[in-house]
Image (cartoon, rainbow, N blue to C red):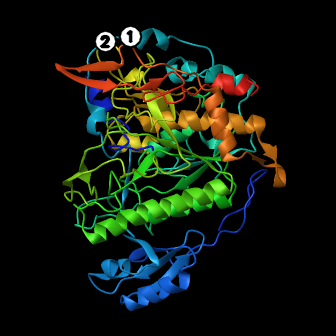
Amino acid sequence: MRRVASGWTALAAVVALAACSPTPPAGGGTQSKPTSPSVQHADFLVFYAAGRHQQALKAVERAGGTTVGEDPRLGYLLADGGGRTFAEDLGTDPAIVGVSPDRAIGSTAARRTGLAARRTGPAAFPDASALLASRPGEPLAGLQWDMRMIGADRANAKVPGSRQVLVGVIDTGIDGKHPDIAANFDHELSRNFVTDKPKDDNGETLDGPCEAKDCKDPVDEDDDGHGTHVASTIAAPINGIGIAGVAPDVRLVNIRAGQDSGFFFLKPSLDALTYAADIGVDVANLSYFVDPWLFNCTNNRSDSRKQQLEQQAIITGMQRAIDYARGKGVTLVSALGNGAADLGRPTVDDKSPGYPEGEQKVRRVDNSCINVPAESNGVISVSSIGPSGRKAIYSDYGVEQTDLSAPGGDVLDGTGAKATRSILGAAPERVLRAAGRIDASGNPKGADVVRDCTRSPCAYYQYLDGTSMAAPHATGVAAILISRFGKPGAGGALSLAPATVEDLLYKSAAQKACPTPRQYVYKSYGQTDTHMCEGEQSRNGFYGRGMVDAWKAATFEP
């Protein structure tokens, strides 16, 4: 089983450390017309058992609620509740398998740093500084140690990816106007399933004031920066600007499910997955987890009945959406998590429920509790590697949980702390301005931000760490494999069964053995943290079945 502990991180510590209705695809993709719920928001999402639709409708009515919409693809009703015990009353009906409030219940890397932001000293790996020498290629290619590590710099020339391959980025959005993304951004297919929420349920600031009149951001904007960074790692084009992605010729589709604040709603996550399936997306990147529950337990004695029903709804609803997407040919790649934890042995969850802030409690958990989507069936979960090749200090691990590994950055992978050991990716200029990372003239204020003015307008990039940054490397390699082995379909689109893509990813990965000794000790400013690597070279808790290899994916014959 695969599990995530703690939030993904865009490693906010980098800044401190450095300062010390769908349209058919154009030329590819297949689709069927999506069946959308008839309303955008209701009090509850009510999931019913297979074949129990009518009984579910009656159950809502008996509990004093009103059904205001539904999505038969995933088997849920949208209902306005009738009283404080509406969810509990519904939960007594055998037709109902989960009930969740329709509210913000997820987070990206940028929201929490957790253990991933801890600082550590030198370890028994070489300093990565030598890897940062100037190299041929795009202007900032010399800073992309991650692409050289997986052979993407060579693969770019061999198999840059097909324009018939669609990659969905389910995240906080994509800056579609960024000079190093625009050429591969599919504006027509992109969608935003999120409405900004200025304040949370307790009246505290969440997303802040709405920028758009209807609080619905345009599909080519990203007010967080997380999704833009992810997208550029996958498919920044070779255009003489900045950097190059793993698969620089594939198309990027923004399928936004995250709030500006980094939280996610359950329903937008469901809508994003089903939309990806219906428009013919080939592979989708999910660098986030759905909360408020770090671990979703179906029957934890520490939880109220309402909380149990909510967790059951998250598990059930997301699994149905994942199954729906895979059934229509979407390969799904997820970040593993940044809790620096052995996910095979969870004991305590003191982070949940994580929304609204202040609701957390301490509860005992075990292996029956799961993180969503990284531990959902059918998702490829990716751990993070630093520039020396070691597992990043913050990355979660576990022999049953880690499927693959990929560069995700580690500022502490060597002597001292250096931002350049993180992953360089595209950044929206206005996000950097709002965060105070560039001055009024556009000059970067720290080593964590890079500007390329090879062409006008200047393009901006930032260094970020996390399994959120590792996952898109695997997504890009998946896009290379689909470009090579995909079968032509309607409109010239390429398709390849998710099970086949997963198998090819494993076969093309570079196997990595556990370190010697297996109990690896990270040293962190006078403190130590020991991570135990279990398993064999063919599959272990640090690296899974191996590190993704773009060059092998572009050249091998299975």
Residue 553 location (% of width, % of height):
68, 27
Give the Cα separation between the discs numbered 1 and 2. Answer: 6 Å
Task: Tell me the element at label 2.
Answer: loop
Which of the 4 image quadrants contains residue 274?
bottom right
Q: Amino acid at mark 2?
A: Thr
In the displayed structure, does residue 229 sit left or right of residue 202? right
The answer to whether residue 345 shows anywhere in this view is yes
Residue 337 location (% of width, % of height):
39, 40
**Circle 2 Cα neighbour tier, 10 Å, few/some/many (<14 / 14–19 / ≥20):** some
Q: Is residue 185 above or below residue 302?
A: above
For disc 1, the marked residue is 127
Q: Amino acid at mark 1?
A: Asp
Task: Tell me the element at label 1.
Answer: loop
Instruction: Give the position of the C terminus as an image quadrant.
Output: top right
**Circle 1 Cα neighbour tier, 10 Å, few/some/many (<14 / 14–19 / ≥20):** some
For disc 2, the marked residue is 415
The answer to whether residue 189 shows anywhere in this view is no
Instruction: Give the position of the N terminus as an image quadrant.
Output: top left
Residue 165 location (% of width, % of height):
71, 44
Q: Earlier in the sequence, mark 1 or mark 2?
A: 1
Q: Give residue 469's mark.
A: none
Q: Are marks 1 and 2 in contact (CB under 8 Å)?
A: yes
In the displayed structure, does residue 469 sit left or right of residue 35? left
Which of the 4 image quadrants contains residue 456?
top right
Q: Is residue 514 above or below residue 88?
A: above
